[in-house]
Image (cartoon, rainbow, N blue to C red):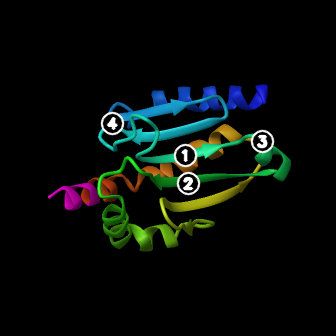
Amino acid sequence: MKVLKKVFRNLEREMYKSSWFDDGWEIYNRGVYLQLYKDNWYNQNQGGIHFETFIEAREVKQKAFPICMHAEEDCPSQQAFIKEFMALERDRIKNWKGYQIGEGYSICKRILPLNFKNLEQRLLEEFNRLRQLEKGVEQALCLVQA
């Protein structure tokens, strides 16, 4: 787990250095669990809208881990948000290799093989892919708050 904590620290450091990061992005890093979200996505308590990954004991044992998008209970008008967001972004997500549309608060998910070779870079690439959903999140939030 020590190696994984270092991977997550390095990933966080790389995100902070990215040109896009200063635009209201936030990171919650709990060692082997990380969320990326915008400051207006109701995720101050980690229960709003966010992109997430984790590699805990179960994932190490299974040699696979998820990267996903959630809209949890702190998301205003959660079900209406999910409906509006999916109307905007479902096709894009379906075209991403390996991504599946989720159920409930889980918007989408991809399971990646746990291979330590280039792990930080692979995680950064996946978060950069998920970041493309930013405009859809913003639009859906505007629609449900109107």
Identify which amino acid the numbered label 1 is placed on: Glu
Q: Badge 1, how many Cα within 10 Å: few under 14, some, many 20+? A: many
- How far apart marks 1 and 4 lie (CA) works out to 15 Å
> Residue drawn 51% across and 72% down?
95
Disc with the residue nearer the chain's start (4 vs 3): 4
Marks 1 and 2 close (CB-CB < 8 Å): yes
Disc with the residue nearer the chain's start (4 vs 2): 4
Element at badge 1? strand
Element at badge 2? strand
> Residue drawn 34% across and 44% down?
41
- How far apart marks 3 and 2 lie (CA) works out to 21 Å
- How far apart marks 3 and 1 lie (CA) works out to 20 Å
Identify which amino acid the numbered label 2 is placed on: Cys
Disc with the residue nearer the chain's start (1 vs 4): 4
**Residue 8 covered by magenta stretch:** no
Residue underneath mark 1: 52
Q: Residue 39 carries which label?
A: 4
- Residue 137's spot in the image, x, y percent? 33, 55
Residue underneath mark 2: 68
